[in-house]
């Protein structure tokens, strides 16, 4: 059992502010499902004291009564305690429009976990805080922002955590924490006893002129002492005690244990009467041989009786040892199960609450809960019962399914074929793609052939070939013009006239060109060896001379560059990261929320109409989707990606197109 000691501090009311503390510990059934409630309420008038005609005390009592009814009166089925508490705070804070409602609520659920007394859940709106003293150190576990814009938004701040013996908890309004310094608060809480703490803090609060709006509740937690056993003396008391012990003895195997004890008691009573009878045998009978024979017979019966009693006692001792061992084994199993279940269940329920508020935190909690259960199930020393093992396995399956949803993981069993290139041109084996609006170009490097098609209707034909495209490596498309880079230089292919011409001659300054893009009529080449991006300004007859795109003095490390994408800014994909540049200058950019780093990324796609970055991560057989802020959004996993060479994305059609030899596959967008 857990002992919770409470004390309250409440300031004086004023015409425009009223505060109060409400605590409630329900009966056993509600205590296990809803817990003990600690509530701090502050009401603030919407108008000035002169114009305010609201009866603040009446409103305050109604707020407390409404909160109590909403939390304990409404059954919270299929939702966690934290979710139910948050819903109650939201309902009550929005229900009273005549005043501004500030609430800081805490719920304590007792548990039987070793080393922990229970779990506390907190929710707050308006202004206020919650602090805890543990191991002589003061921690702030909840801080509700009291700014006006935060109050108007109605945002509920949540927190939760385990409670240990010796913890001292304080929930208070924003006005309380404004008047009491952290140092004084810590020194006061070190007293441990809530009444002594109140005696120190109350004068600090009531000694000021502005004590209205002050409210705080102090709670200390410890293990409750068991009641001492009543001493038993006299026959009547002994009979009552024996009857009580019989009534509380555990029934095992459908009442067999009760039957055993009843038979043993009868046997013992008969043995006691037999021994008494032997002691009362007459002593004045003649010393005849027959008498000696009778005496010896009684002695043998006496020996048999004593042997039976001793044997029965040995059986009783063996049964006691067996049942004691069995009870200790069950207790050990319960403790091992509880140590895992309490933590994993708490993390799971908190993760469900944070799915919309903080997806990254929710995913981290689910991952921790999954690891906790997996390690417990794999621990050979933890001998769980069959029921416990099934319960953990079921929860592990629930966590895995929820983790897939929160993680945005979409597993593709078999991707659909978007287009079989052999139907457009036989023996086609393509390696590079380029997309602009609805026009897709496909480069067959070995044959030196460029294909064109429409993403919307899949109409396709061959538009370029011949010596100029021989050994072509990269492909791009812009405004009806296809571009490839080959031994002849940069070759432009007219998609309408199906003609080819060199627009940029080979340059001895080029190192290792790993990507080619056209944006806004300008041509860009990513040179990994030189660590440069070369820009060729579009002109009326072709392109101008080569120039560095990076600003003066900017020399980025592009030694790991593999691809780039342009949306006005330039994004460069490296072996393990993405670099962001704007107007020739690096921008701060980092990827967050991605559980597994890139392994052999080969393609990057975005455009000026998209808010996303798409990365073809061939090593992990996935396509990763990121915000342009770097935040992870989702990923599509398909084993066939191991043979994919290039990727483009049509957000208009809602498709990711993947090139693999003679086939282009498609993966449809999923929420």
Image (cartoon, rainbow, N blue to C red):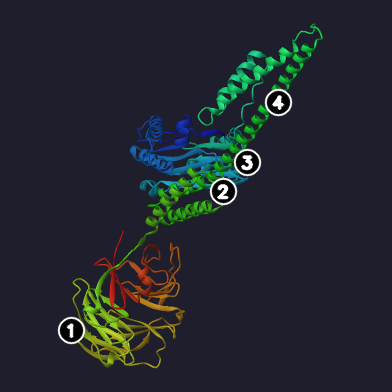
Q: Position of residue 60 (x, y in %)?
A: 40, 32
Disc on res. 496 = 1
Callout 2 secondary element:
loop
Callout 3 secondary element:
loop
Question: In 3D space, how far apart are the residues under numbered discs 2 and 3 (Cα atoms)?
Answer: 39 Å
Q: Are marks 1 and 4 in contact (CB under 8 Å)?
A: no
Dot 1 or dot 2: first in sequence order is 2
Residue topped by disc 4: 307
Task: Pick the residue in front: 42 or 454.
Answer: 454
Within 10 Å of the Cα at label 2, are there few (<14), some (14-19), or many (20+) other Cα atoms? some
- Residue 268 left/right relative to 572: right
Dot 1 or dot 4: first in sequence order is 4
Q: Quadrant of residue 311?
A: top right
Residue topped by disc 2: 382
Residue 103 appears in the rendering: yes
Dot 2 or dot 4: first in sequence order is 4
Question: In 3D space, how far apart are the residues under numbered discs 3 and 1 (Cα atoms)?
Answer: 83 Å
């Amino acid at each position: 059992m857990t002992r919770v000691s409470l004390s309250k501090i409440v300031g004086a009311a004023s015409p425009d502010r009223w505060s109060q503390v409400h605590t409630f510990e329900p009966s056993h059934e509600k205590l296990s499902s809803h817990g003990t409630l600690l509530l701090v309420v502050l009401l603030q008038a919407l108008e000035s004291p002169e114009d305010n005609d609201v009866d603040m005390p009446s409103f305050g009592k109604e707020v407390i009564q409404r909160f109590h009814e909403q939390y304990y009166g409404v059954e919270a089925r299929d939702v966690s305690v934290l979710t139910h508490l948050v819903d109650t705070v939201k309902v009550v804070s929005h229900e009273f429009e005549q005043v501004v409602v500030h609430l800081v609520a805490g719920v304590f659920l007792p548990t039987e976990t070793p080393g922990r007394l229970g779990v506390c859940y907190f929710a707050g709106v308006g202004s206020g805080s919650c602090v805890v003293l543990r191991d002589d150190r003061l921690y702030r576990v909840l801080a509700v922002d009291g700014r006006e814009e935060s109050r108007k938004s109605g945002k509920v701040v949540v927190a939760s955590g385990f409670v240990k013996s010796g913890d001292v908890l304080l929930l208070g309004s924003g006005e309380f924490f404004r008047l009491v310094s952290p140092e004084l608060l810590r020194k006061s809480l070190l007293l441990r006893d809530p009444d002594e703490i109140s005696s120190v803090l109350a004068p600090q609060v009531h000694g000021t002129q502005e004590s209205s709006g002050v409210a705080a509740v102090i709670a200390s937690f410890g293990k409750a002492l068991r009641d001492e056993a009543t001493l038993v003396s006299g026959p009547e008391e002994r009979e009552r005690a024996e009857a009580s012990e019989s009534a509380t003895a555990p029934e095992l195997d459908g009442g067999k244990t009760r039957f055993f004890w009843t038979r043993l008691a009868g046997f013992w009573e008969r043995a006691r009467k037999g021994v008494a009878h032997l002691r009362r045998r007459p002593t004045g009978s003649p010393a005849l041989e027959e008498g000696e024979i009778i005496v010896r017979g009684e002695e043998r019966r006496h020996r048999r009786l004593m042997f039976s009693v001793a044997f029965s006692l040995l059986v009783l001792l063996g049964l006691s040892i067996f049942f004691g061992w069995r009870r200790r084994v069950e207790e050990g199993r319960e403790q091992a199960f509880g140590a895992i279940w309490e933590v994993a269940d708490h993390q799971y329920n908190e993760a469900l609450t944070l799915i919309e508020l903080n997806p990254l935190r929710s995913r981290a909690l689910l991952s921790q809960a999954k690891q906790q259960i997996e390690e417990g199930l794999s621990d050979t020393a933890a001998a769980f019962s069959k029921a416990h093992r099934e319960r953990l396995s079921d929860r592990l399956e629930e966590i895995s399914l929820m983790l897939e949803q929160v993680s945005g993981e979409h597993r593709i069993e078999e991707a659909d074929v978007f287009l079989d290139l052999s139907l457009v041109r036989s023996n086609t084996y393509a390696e590079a793609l380029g997309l602009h609006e609805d026009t897709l170009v496909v480069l067959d490097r070995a044959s030196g052939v460029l294909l064109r098609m429409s993403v919307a209707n899949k109409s396709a034909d061959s538009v370029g070939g011949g010596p100029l495209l021989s050994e072509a490596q990269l492909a791009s498309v812009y405004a009806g013009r296809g571009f490839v880079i080959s031994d002849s230089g940069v070759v432009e292919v007219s998609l309408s006239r199906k003609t080819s011409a060199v627009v940029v001659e080979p340059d001895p300054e080029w190192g290792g060109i790993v990507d080619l893009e056209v944006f806004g009529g300008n041509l860009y080449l990513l040179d990994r060896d030189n660590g440069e991006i070369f820009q060729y300004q579009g002109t009326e007859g072709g392109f101008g001379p080569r120039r560095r795109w990076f600003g003066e003095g900017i020399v980025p490390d592009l030694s790991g560059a593999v691809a780039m994408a342009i949306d006005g800014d330039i994004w460069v994909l490296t072996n393990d990261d993405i670099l962001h540049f704007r107007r020739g200058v690096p921008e701060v950019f980092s990827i967050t929320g991605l559980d597994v780093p890139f392994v052999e990324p080969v393609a990057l796609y975005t455009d000026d109409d998209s808010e996303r970055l798409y990365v073809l991560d061939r090593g992990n057989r996935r396509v990763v989707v990121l915000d342009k802020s770097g935040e992870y959004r989702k990923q599509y996993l398909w084993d066939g990606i191991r043979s994919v060479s290039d990727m483009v994305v049509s957000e208009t059609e809602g498709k990711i197109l993947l090139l693999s030899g003679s086939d282009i596959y498609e993966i449809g967008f999923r929420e």
